[in-house]
Each structure stands twice: as C-alpha cells, then as structure tokens.
Amino acid sequence: MRCLGLDYGTKRIGLAYGDEVGVATPLPAVLDATSAMHWARIADVIRQRRITDLVVGYPYNMDGSVGFKAAEVDAFVEELTARFQLPVHRVDETLTSYAAESTISKKDRRDVRGSGVIDSRAATIILQDFLDQKFPPTLPEA
C-alpha cells in the first residue's frame, strides 16, 4: 500500500506520502496557478510514487456534522476517483491545520503561509491518522 494524503484547499493542496511502514512524510504542496496544473502535479506524484490509495481530509465540524466545505471536497473526491481510478479514503481533518500551524513559530507563520508548508503538514497529520488505523503500532512483548 502506497498512500498519498491530500489536504484540499482552493489555493493550495497539501500532500504527504506514506506506506505500510506506517509513517507519513510531507511532500511539497501543489501551488500551481491553474486547475489543470494542479491535476498534472497530482498525477505526477501518483505515477512517480506508484500510489495505490488516496487519503483526503474531510471537513467535519466539532460536533461530527459535515462542514460547509464538504461539498467542495466531495467534488474534489469525485474528480480524483474519475481521473485516477484509485480507492479514496476520507479522514476527519478536524483541527489538522491548527495542529500543523502550531508546529511553526509564531514569527514565521506569515512567511510560510503561502508556501504550502502548513498544508502539507496538515496532509501528513491526516495521512498519519489513516495509517495508524490501518497499521496500529504494536508494543513489544515484555
């Protein structure tokens, strides 16, 4: 299993990679100017990393209801499925951007916001949640 984690946004799409080893790693975010360029970049990553599964952050509210951005993410998931014919897994992305942003010092946040670093860190958190469910860590026997 080779997974591509995606944190969808209208301006940037955060990316992360993980496999059966169970560790998610951030990749450079998709920052391209046009939708066609976004899809080409995602296709390149899928091909180069031989991705078998896509993991997309899904915007639930704190109470578990579906967030307002869900319709956009649903359309994105439909397009992913149509273009790549790979399984797409939705993972709750509640507070992932907040958690990703908190890993960056306050003085540097403004500088990195447009770079996609926070988006890819959020994708890493989303993907790690998925991998932890798929491949739970095992404790050594005493």
Image (cartoon, helix red, strand yellow):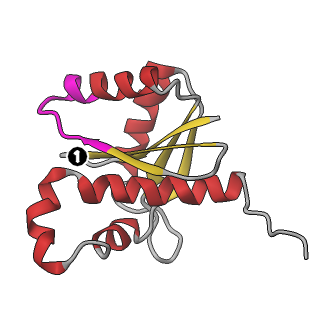
Which span of residues is magenta-colored? 28-38
Image coords of residue 84 (percent x, y):
48, 21
> As shown in the figure, which amino acid type bears the numbered disc 1?
Arg
Residue 58: say if magenta: no
Give the x, y percent position of residue 73: 39, 46
On the rendered structure, is 63 left or right of 131?
A: left
Q: Residue 112: x, y in percent?
A: 15, 60
What residue appears at the point 62 percent right and 53 percent down from the top-left corner? 131
Q: Which residue is nearer to you in this view: 33 or 110?
A: 110
Q: Is the residue 95 above or below the residue 18 in the image?
A: below
- Asked if residue 32 is among those painted magenta in the image, a careful observer would answer yes
- Where residue 52 sits, quadrant-wise, is top right
Residue 139 at x, y = what percent?
Answer: 80, 69
Tag 1 residue = 12
What's the residue at 45%, 53% (across, down)? 57
Furthest-front residue in view? 142
Extreme-right residue of the structure: 142
Taking the spot 44% from the left edge, 29% from the top edge, the residue there is 80
Estimate how packed mark 1 is, as few (under 14), some (14 to 19) or many (20 or more) residues with alpha carbons within 10 Å.
many
* Quadrant of the image containing the C terminus: bottom right
Secondary element at tag 1: loop
Position of 104 relative to 55 (above/below): below
